[in-house]
């Protein structure tokens, strides 16, 4: 695997290396024998589970979150190569609700008949399974895109004991969010991260938390873009809104100085979104967007610290597993992209940190996992019976094992309606393969090319690797349940 970037390592030492031909077919070839699953016994019987996610939080944003690094990463295990196989809002969060890939939960985009809240089947989900196992289930923050529109503002999806979700477009009004609290709507005139923080801490502190084990999903909207806009915001690029005390705290922060910035990979096909061009004005606007994202992360980081403190104050910390993650990666300029959805590492990669009883302390692990695994793992921790076939696997046994590679199917659909698939692909160890709707392909080996700036798909010397990954894509593009890849193989 490539070295980790951001707070948990650096890729910079590899940036200037020549693309020497060092690979061989057996670098991709799946071994005939997978690693046996390590023994795992839950350290605690039905611990509390707090899952904190942040919308559009990129892996490298952890660099600007010192409390999260100190209180979670340093006290737990960080999975540095976790990805969102469909890296966009609703499909990713639906995987966190189901333990399934997008093709199986059928909520493949954010709008239209195959996207958003109204397209989601809310039965057989993780909260229902946890309730059956004896858990209270708590939600606070942003749910699926479209929740609260077309008469759904008072909906409470099945499976939730205490429901506190932002509704309709107020989700993106950072100073005036409206929350549905178990069917009652209330508008708050406070910064949205603080409203969500306080809602969560109120639930953590409630007396009934002593009666049952509990699971909470707390989904912050920051650093996703939102408003209202300030007069000095760029006109052509969407930005987020930091808390008042954090505005201008990172004035002048530059975009990452990395080789993939505003660069189209060599031999990228014509259909590749990386062929977009940003002029000087566009790049200047992206710099401001990046600066404001980092500023918005500051309140999020303080909120994470407040949750750890509240768990400690209420005597629950030692029996609570905390999972910190994001729905998808994000980039402001990497591969000429402002956003997510694509198959490049910076838009797929998500932070994933686990802390709690039975989890190794201070460990950094490059084992390949996807966000469907998070839901499957939560159910395994709780001793719950999943209500749907699971595409994901329980990653708890692997937290104490050496780093492992795993086949992870990739996919993305057209944003507006989800009717047309944009690409499918495979991530396995250092290798990323994508096949676009027109049949064109990209292939990267991050051991040689950590920033994915040279596609290998058209090079004859990589024909064997291309054929292997193409075959894996064909095999797993429509996998479901037990037919999805669940084996782990030694890395390196």
Image (cartoon, rainbow, N blue to C red):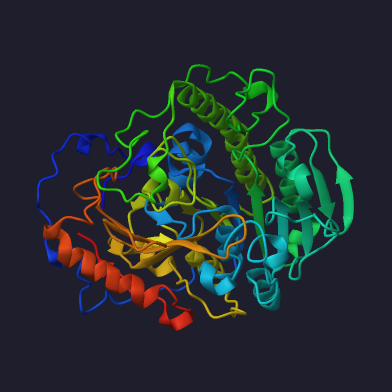
Residue 435: x and y, percent?
Answer: 35, 62
Q: Is residue 328 visible?
A: yes
Quadrant of res 427: bottom left
Residue 256 or 65: which is nearer the viewer? 256
Residue drawn at x 73%, y 70% is 159
Relative horizontal placement of residue 394, taking residue 51 as reference (left or right): left
**Residue 357 image point, x, y percent:** 50, 60
Q: Is residue 275 above or below residue 153?
A: above
Picture layout, residue 274 above or below residue 152: above
Dividing the picture into quarters, in which one does residue 137 lie?
bottom right
Residue nearer the viewer, 140 or 262: 262
If the image is split into quadrants, where does the C terminus sit? bottom left
Considering depth in this image, is 262 or 345 the residue closer to the camera?
262
Side of 363 relative to 89 (left or right) = left
Number of dots carrying numbers: 0
Q: Residue at x 33, y 59 (%)?
A: 440
Is residue 278 shown left or right of residue 98? left
Q: Is residue 3 left or right of residue 256?
A: left
- The x and y percentages for residue 482 are 44, 82
Given residues 382 and 390, the one toward you in this image is 390
Q: Residue at x 26, y 34 (%)?
A: 12
- Does residue 39 show up? no
Q: Position of residue 123 (x, y in %)?
A: 70, 75
């Amino acid at each position: 695997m490539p070295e980790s970037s951001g707070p948990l390592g650096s890729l910079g030492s590899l940036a200037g290396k020549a693309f020497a031909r060092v690979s061989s077919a057996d670098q991709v070839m799946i071994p005939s024998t997978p690693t046996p699953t390590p023994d795992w016994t839950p350290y605690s019987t039905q611990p509390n589970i707090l899952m904190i996610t942040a919308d559009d939080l990129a892996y490298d944003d952890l660099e600007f979150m010192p409390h999260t690094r100190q209180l979670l990463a340093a006290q737990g295990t960080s999975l540095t190569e976790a990805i969102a196989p469909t890296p966009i809002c609703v499909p990713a969060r639906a995987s966190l609700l189901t333990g399934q890939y997008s093709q199986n939960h059928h909520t493949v985009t954010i709008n239209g008949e195959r996207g958003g809240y109204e397209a989601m089947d809310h039965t057989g989900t993780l909260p229902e399974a946890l309730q059956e196992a004896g858990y209270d289930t708590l939600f606070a923050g942003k749910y699926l895109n479209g929740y609260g529109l077309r008469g759904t503002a008072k909906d409470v999806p099945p499976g939730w004991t205490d429901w506190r979700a932002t509704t309709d477009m107020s989700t993106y009004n950072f100073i005036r969010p409206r929350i549905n609290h178990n069917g009652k709507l209330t508008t708050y005139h406070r910064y949205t991260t603080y409203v969500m923080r306080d809602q969560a801490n109120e639930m953590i502190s409630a007396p009934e938390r002593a009666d049952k084990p509990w699971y909470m999903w707390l989904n912050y909207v920051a650093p996703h873009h939102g408003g209202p806009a300030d007069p000095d915001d760029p006109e052509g690029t969407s930005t987020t809104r930091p808390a008042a005390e954090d505005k201008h705290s990172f004035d002048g922060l530059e975009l990452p100085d990395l080789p993939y910035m505003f660069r189209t990979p060599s031999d990228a096909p014509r259909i590749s979104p990386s062929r977009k061009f940003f002029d000087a004005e566009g790049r200047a606007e992206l710099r401001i967007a990046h600066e404001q994202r980092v500023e918005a992360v500051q309140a999020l980081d303080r909120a994470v610290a407040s949750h750890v403190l509240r768990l400690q104050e209420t005597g629950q910390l030692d029996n609570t597993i905390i999972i910190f993650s994001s729905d998808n990666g994000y980039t402001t300029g990497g591969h000429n992209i402002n956003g997510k959805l694509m198959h490049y590492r910076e838009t797929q990669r998500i932070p994933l940190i686990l802390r709690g009883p039975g989890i190794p302390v201070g460990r950094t692990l490059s084992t390949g996992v996807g966000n469907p695994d998070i839901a499957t793992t939560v159910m395994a921790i709780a001793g719950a019976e999943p209500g749907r076939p699971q595409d994901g696997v329980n990653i708890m046994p692997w937290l104490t094992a050496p780093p492992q590679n795993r086949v992870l199917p990739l996919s993305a659909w057209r944003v507006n309606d989800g009717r047309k698939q944009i690409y499918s692909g495979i991530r396995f160890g250092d290798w990323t393969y994508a096949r676009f709707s027109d049949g064109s392909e990209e292939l990267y080996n991050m051991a040689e090319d950590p920033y994915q700036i040279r596609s290998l798909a058209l090079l004859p010397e990589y024909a064997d690797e291309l054929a292997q990954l193409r075959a894996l894509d064909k095999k797993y593009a429509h996998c479901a349940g037990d037919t999805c890849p669940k084996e782990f193989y030694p890395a390196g």
